Image (cartoon, rainbow, N blue to C red):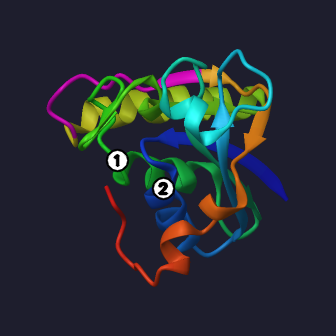
Amino acid sequence: MEKAIFAAGCFWGVQLDFDKAAGICATVVGYIGGHSLSPTYEEVCSGTTGHAEALEVSFDPEIITFQELLDIFWQCHNPTTLNQQGPDRGSQYRSAIYYNSEEQRLAAEKSKINCTASALWPDPIVTEITQAGKFWRAEDYHQKYLEKRHITISCH
């Protein structure tokens, strides 16, 4: 089992999109990349903690590769809007890949170059590629938020 962390706007829709893929063992929504300890949803939403809403994915690399996770990431949000996804605005909604190893970093950078070259997105990609730090699990009511409400399409 390996882990990957992605930020792609509101974490509810990101979780729903990744949960559909075979080989995903578990997903947890939470916060990463900020400066305060034990951030709450309200603090992160204020934009003052520096955290991004993110998804930690536990996956079986024998079934789904990190590259396949990157493909889901590029397709589940708009990586060309700085600190924004749809109506959600603020640095907490930034596009970012938080790598856990040198292999993940290299794969993420190559994937970003390939995505740019593919012209999938006509505007420049602003996705950050950053070493993962402390991941803070979000409050329980955020876990599987859309699934609990029987919503089957992403909010992205």
Q: Residue at x 27, y 29 (%)?
A: 81
Tell which of 48 and 28 is nearer to you: 48
Label 2 crowd (10 A; few <14 / some 14-19 / many >=20): many
| Amino acid type, mark 2 | Val
Spatial CA span between label 2 and label 1: 8 Å
> Residue tagged by mark 2?
14
At which x and y percent is residue 36? 73, 19
At which x and y percent is residue 146? 48, 71
Q: Residue at x 57, y 31 (%)?
A: 44
Q: Is residue 52 visible?
A: no
Q: What is the number of the mark on residue 37?
A: none
Q: Residue at x 49, y 58 (%)?
A: 12
Q: Are marks 2 and 1 in contact (CB under 8 Å)?
A: yes
Mark 2 or mark 1: name the one nearer the start of the chain.
2
Note whether 2 is above or below 125 in the view shown: below
Q: Is residue 114 left or right of residue 105?
A: left
**Magenta stretch holds residue 126:** yes
Q: Secondary structure at mark 1?
A: loop
Q: Residue furthest front?
A: 42
> Image quadrant for the C terminus?
bottom left
Tell which of 100 and 32 is nearer to you: 32
Note whether 29 is above or below 85 in the view shown: below
Q: What is the number of the mark on residue 77?
A: 1
Magenta segment range? 121-129
Tell which of 46 and 101 is nearer to you: 46
**Magenta stretch holds residue 72:** no
Q: Residue furthest left?
A: 122
At which x and y percent is residue 31? 65, 37
At which x and y percent is residue 126? 35, 22
Q: Is residue 87 visible?
A: yes
> Image quadrant for the N terminus?
bottom right
Q: Is residue 37 left or right of residue 40?
A: right
